[in-house]
Image (tube, helix red, strand yellow):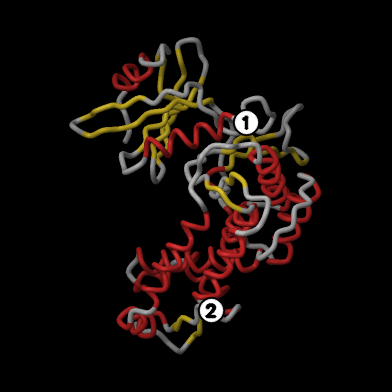
């Protein structure tokens, strides 16, 4: 929901802040971010959250997690004020929270260089170090993915779905859902459970030209911002690493072995000094790849997927590891 300057002015009055002007507006899935310059030239982010069940608790949890980074050099977007505002516009309810401004910009996966991939691994490793101290309540990754596995099992066992996949996409599923569930169980019983970001991906990572004092920099590139903790959950760090790897392998045009080496060995291990084991990494990665593939099928007409590069790359990876079979030409 994009707010008018007059509404933004009224919203900021609740925080005692003098509205100046709107610099930029960015719309996301759950929120709309308004970059605002106050009268004193300070820049802040005012975020309007979509009204949905449990959104207030979600915002409070994520703001509480973000606040632990205030005294650290890690550039995590943090709440300026812990109070949430509730606004009504045309009989619709919106929740508002205000955050510090972080410079920089996102870049497409296709533009990620070796430096960017190393920096991503380094940043998530530093995030994990500091997030270990968080003692607040967060949803469980295991609970969420048990439910996702049940959803996917129902979907892929539907005869009509399987028939349509055969005819329209030329594929047949061979997904071991029992094994996936066992992986989730195994990961939930491991030590080192902690707060995770769980959306440490392209749209939530800002890069900028490096400046003296930047914590995360390689050459002339720095990670200048870590955004959106809305999906923050509780679980083993391997979940976070696997989530980012899933996107890198599908969308970054570099060989898989180099992505693993840059992201985990050079970034997470060497630069973030993370020595924790990452058991079941490939299995967790497979869960994310299958879930992403399921969402492609669930949310798009099958006929449109032949032109979808992300679908094609995910399909090819799942075929290579034996979780899909190609069964011939699809319908035209």
Which residue is rendered at x = 60% and y = 35% of the image? 225
Image quadrant for the N terminus?
A: top left
Residue furthest to the left? 91
- Mark 2 or 1, which is nearer the eye? 1
Q: Nearer the viewer, residue 277 or 294?
A: 277
Residue at left offset 19%, top offset 31%: 90
The answer to whether the residue labelled 2 contacts the one labelled 1, judged by CB atoms less than 8 Å apart, is no
Q: Quadrant of residue 241?
A: bottom right
**Left or right: where does residue 162 sit relative to residue 177?**
left
Rendered residue at 48%/36% (across/down): 61
Whole-percent x and y of residue 309? 49, 66
Name the residue that disc number 1 marks.
69
Crowd rating for badge 2 (residues with CA inside 10 Å; few <14, some 14–19, many 20+): some
Image: 74 above or below 40: below
Viewer-nearest residue: 314 or 252? 314
Q: Quadrant of the C terminus?
A: bottom left
Residue 249 versus residue 93 in the image, above or below: below
Place of residue 280 in the rendered image (x, y in percent of width and height, measured from the top left): 66, 65
Side (left or right) of 142 relative to 20 = right
| Residue 250 percent coordinates (x, y) | 57, 64
Inter-mark Cα distance, 2 to 1? 40 Å
Task: Point out which mark residue 273 bears.
Answer: none
Question: Which one is nearer the viewer's eye here, 158 or 143?
Answer: 143
Please name the residue that numbered disc 2 is placed on. 323
């Amino acid at each position: 929901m994009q707010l008018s300057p007059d509404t933004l002015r009224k919203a900021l009055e609740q925080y005692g802040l003098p509205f100046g002007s709107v610099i930029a507006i960015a719309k996301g899935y759950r929120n709309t971010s308004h970059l605002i310059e106050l009268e004193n030239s300070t820049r802040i982010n005012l975020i309007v959250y979509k009204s949905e069940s449990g959104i207030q608790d979600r915002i409070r949890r994520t703001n509480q997690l973000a606040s632990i980074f205030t005294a650290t050099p890690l550039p995590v977007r943090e709440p300026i004020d812990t109070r949430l505002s509730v606004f009504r516009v045309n009989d619709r309810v919106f929740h508002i929270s205000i955050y510090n401004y972080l410079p920089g910009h996102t870049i497409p996966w296709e533009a990620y260089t070796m430096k960017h991939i190393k920096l991503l691994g380094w940043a998530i490793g530093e995030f994990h170090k500091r997030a270990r101290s968080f003692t607040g309540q967060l949803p469980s990754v295991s609970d969420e993915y048990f439910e996702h596995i049940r959803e996917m099992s129902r979907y892929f066992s539907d005869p009509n779905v399987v028939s349509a996949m055969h005819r329209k996409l030329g594929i047949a599923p061979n997904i071991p859902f029992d094994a996936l569930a066992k992986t989730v169980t195994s990961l939930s019983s491991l030590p080192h459970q902690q707060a995770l970001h769980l959306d440490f991906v392209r749209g939530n990572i800002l890069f900028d030209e490096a400046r003296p004092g930047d914590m995360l920099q390689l050459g002339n590139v720095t990670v200048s911002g870590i955004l959106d903790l809305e999906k923050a959950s509780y679980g083993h760090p391997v979940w976070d690493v696997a989530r980012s790897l899933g996107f890198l392998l599908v969308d970054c045009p570099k060989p898989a072995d180099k992505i693993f080496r840059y992201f985990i060995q050079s970034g997470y291990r060497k630069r973030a000094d993370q020595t924790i084991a990452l058991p079941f990494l490939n299995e967790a990665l497979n869960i994310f790849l299958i879930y992403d593939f399921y969402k492609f099928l669930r949310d798009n007409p099958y006929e449109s997927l032949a032109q979808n590069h992300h679908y094609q790359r995910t399909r090819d990876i799942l075929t290579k590891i034996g979780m899909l079979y190609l069964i011939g030409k699809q319908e035209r």
